[in-house]
Image: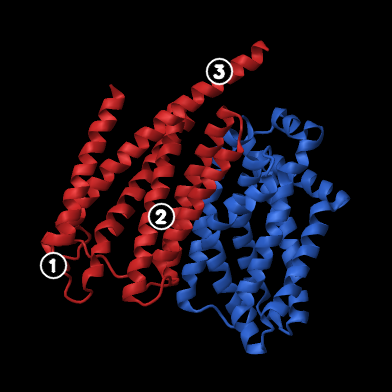
Amino acid sequence: MRQKWIYVLLGLAAVLLIRNLYVILYVLPDEKEQGPIYRVIFFHLPAFFTAGLCYMAALLASLHTLLRQSSRADALAVAATEVGLAFAAVNLITGMIWARIIWGIWWTWDARLTWALICWLIYAGYLMLRHAIEDPTQRARHSAVLNVFAFAAVIITWKAIEWWRTQHPGPVLSIRGARGAMDPAMESMIYQNWLALLLLGAVLVALRLDQERVQREVEALRRQAHAKA
Amino acid sequence: MVREILVVASKDLRTELRTKESINASLSFALTVLLLFSFAFDPTAEQVRQISGGLLWLVFAFAGALVLNRSFARERDNDCLEALVASPLPAWALFLGKCLANLVLLVAIELVCLPVFGVFYNVNWARRPLPLLAVLVLATWGMTVLGTTFSALTVNLRLRELMLPVLLYPMIIPVLIAAIELTTTLVAGEPLQAEQWVWVRLLVAFDIIFTSLAVAFAETVLIS
């Protein structure tokens, strides 16, 4: 039953992505100042939003793990963080490609770039800690605590770096108060592609959850076997 | 309450003063890094003025990780950690006591590094001693609270010496930015500008937020 839902969602995501790619590449015109490269934004921003949602889901799952000692919530935390890291990587890499064309450099120590990289490192540290802890109960509790710390650090780092320096283009979406900064057709495409990436993200998280469940079963069986031997 | 914290802190400091295992390693490491920086950058007097904060705080962060690593690792021998957890101390008092001991050790190491830095790089660093000390304490406390928590999280791991810096450094970046900005100004002997107070506020906020989080989760981290 669950497998079926995953396939349905995956099919939806694939259809939507192909249709979006068609619109992005053939229907929407080049941007007036940036030329064709502006199309990166249709993946850059949605990937960032998806990663952000994943991190938030991981935070909620971690809090749930701490309060209720639920191993399913722990599985969700690791699944969401891993998928979030993948989307954050898409965000970083598409951003670097855009920067190479528009700014002429791959990287600059601008506020948002620096922050995105630090977030990536912090959450990569979370996954590394998980891999290092062998006992499942301890792994769940300790990594949940680390996740809460990580989220707080991410917020504070954002403020700190904003005061430090800023070069990244300002907000372009109308919901961020930048009305009229972007053509409505282009802006709506960003949201449509976000939907596609969100679906893809949900499929990835569901697959990862299944893996995590199977892995736990295997670990439990192995412990049983050791106990009998 | 305060007594319990002080008991743990004094126990840790006494152990450390008798064995001197982490303070010796950490100090000589800090001095070596100070020396290496002079080869790496060969700075002029003007350059030293500009990079003093960054140089000092990188040294402090490297040396700090060594001390923080030992904080809980020291309790592994003879199952001391189990005894501490089983004692009537509340977990947060045990945790704050360890933080306090680490703070004292780290600030002591920093206070030894500063004159050495002054001699090696020909800087009169002590023109604003009290504000500088305040910045040292505030920023070191932020580093200590996170570091002690992560030291507890990683104490049972095979790779703990590697895990602690990997977890700690990205998360203390706000503290380092603020401390570097403030230290550079103060070591140069200038007063803090009005717009630099934002960094002092950042340090205070960071300390409060993470101290509360660490205290709230002390029991989860220590007893499991």
Q: Position of residue B57 (x, y in %)?
A: 64, 68
Q: Which chain is blue?
A: B
Q: For this view, does B79 lie left or right of residue A33?
A: right
Q: How far apart are the two marked residues, 2 and 3, measured between alpha carbons?
A: 35 Å
Of badges 1 and 2, nearer the viewer stands: 1
Disc 3 marks which residue? A221
Colour of chain A in the rendered structure image: red
Q: Nearer the viewer, residue B25 or B49?
A: B25
Mark 3 or mark 1, which is nearer the start of the sequence?
Answer: 1
Residue type for callout 1:
Pro
From the image, which quarter does the N terminus of chain A lie in?
Answer: top left
Can residue B209 be seen in this snapshot? no
Say which residue appears at 31% left-offset and 37% top-offset. A203
Are marks 2 and 3 in one subunit?
yes
From the image, which quarter does the C terminus of chain A lie in?
Answer: top right
Residue type for callout 3:
Leu
Q: Position of residue B108 (x, y in %)?
A: 75, 62
Say which residue appears at 68% left-offset and 74% top-offset. B129
Say which residue appears at 74% left-offset and 42% top-offset. B73
Disc 2 marks which residue? A89
